[in-house]
Amino acid sequence: MDSAVKQEWTRISAQLSKEVLIVPEWHELVLSAAQPQQIDDVVVYSIVPPRLSMFDRAAKRAIDLFISSVLLLLASPIMAMMFVLIPSTSKGKALFTQERVGLDGKTFRLLKFRSMVEDAEKGTGPVLAIDRDARITKLGQFIRTTRIDELPQLINVLRGEMSLVGPRPEREFFIAKFMKEMPHYTDRLKVKPGLTGLAQVRGNYATSPADKLRYDLMYIRDYSPAMDLKLLFQTAIVVLQREASRGVQANDHQAAVGFLKRLSGTQSEMAATQD
C-alpha cells in the first residue's frame, strides 16, 4: 500500500478514535527498535542492520550445544529405528540431504529422514508438497506429522551449521527468486537457520514467504535467550497439533504456485521447498 494512503487512513482513523492495524514493511519493523538521534536541528532514526551481539551469539551457541546434545541422546532410539524402518518400507536410503543457505549466505547440507519416495523430484524438479501428496510414503506421513523427519538436523546444530531456533533454511534458488519481490529477504541470513522459529510457531505450512519474512525479522530484532526457550516450548505444543504439519490444501497450493510464478516469470520454474 502507498505510504500516502496509509498516512491518510491513519489520520482519518485517529479523528474517529478508531484502532489502526497495519501490516508492517521492512523499514517499519526496524524503526520500532531504532534509536532517535539528532543531526544539527533534525531528528533522525539510526537503523542498524539486524545482527545478534557477540554475547547473544555465545549464549545462543551454549543453549544449542546443551539442548541438542540432550535431545540427540533422548531421540537416539527413535533415530536408530528410522534407519531400519525407512529403507525397509520404501526403496532408498533413510537419510535425505539437500543444500541449503545458512548464516551469511554460506551453504551447507541439511539432513532429514526421507519421507517421500526415492528421487521424488526427479521428473518434476522441486515442487510443493500438498496434503495427501502421493509421493509421501505411509511411514513418511507419520514422521512428517510428528516432525521425526527433522531429528537429524540436531546434527546440523551440533556442527554449528544451524541453531535450534531461527529462520528455516532455504534453497539458494528460491532466495534469488524471493529477493525479486522482497529485497530485504537476505536479512534473515544474519542469524543461523533454525529447526524451528517464530514463523513456524505463529504461522503454518501455507503462510506466505512475505509473512514468514516479517516473523523472521521480528525474531532477529527481539532476540533473547529467554525467547529461544519460549519458542522451543511452543514448538513442542505445535508438534502435537496435526494441522500445523499438514501439506497445503488445494487453494493454498494454487496461491503458492502463483506467487512463485510471478517471481520466476516462467511456468517451468513454478516450485517451492518441501519444508
Image: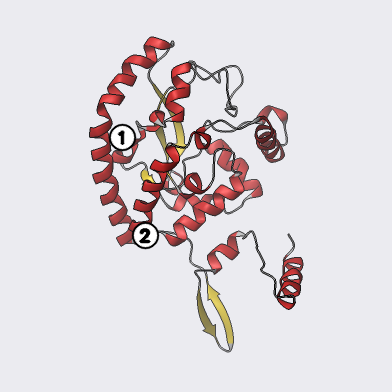
Q: Residues within 10 Å of mark 2 (few under 14, many from 20)?
A: some
Left or right: residue 59 versus residue 91 is left
Residue 46's place in the image compared with 275, above or below, is below
Of residues 228 and 16, the one nearer the viewer is 16
In percent of width and height, residue 144 lies at: 45, 28
Residue 214, image quadrant = bottom right
Residue in the image at 38% along x and 13% along y: 87
The colour mode here is secondary structure
Residue 114, image quadrant = top left
Residue in the image at 24% along x and 33% along y: 74
Of residues 62 and 248, the one nearer the viewer is 248
Residue 18's place in the image compared with 206, above or below, is below
Q: Which mark is residue 128?
A: none
Residue 195 shows up from this direction:
no
Front: mark 1 or 2: 2
Residue that numbered label 1 is attached to: 155
Residue that numbered label 2 is attached to: 224
Task: Look at the image and tell me in which quarter the N terminus lies.
Answer: bottom right
Residue 43's place in the image compared with 254, above or below, is below
Of residues 40 and 76, the one nearer the viewer is 76
Q: CA distance from mark 1 to mark 2?
A: 23 Å
In percent of width and height, residue 164 lies at: 36, 44
Going by the numbered disc 2, the residue's amino acid type is: Ser
Residue 193, image quadrant = top left
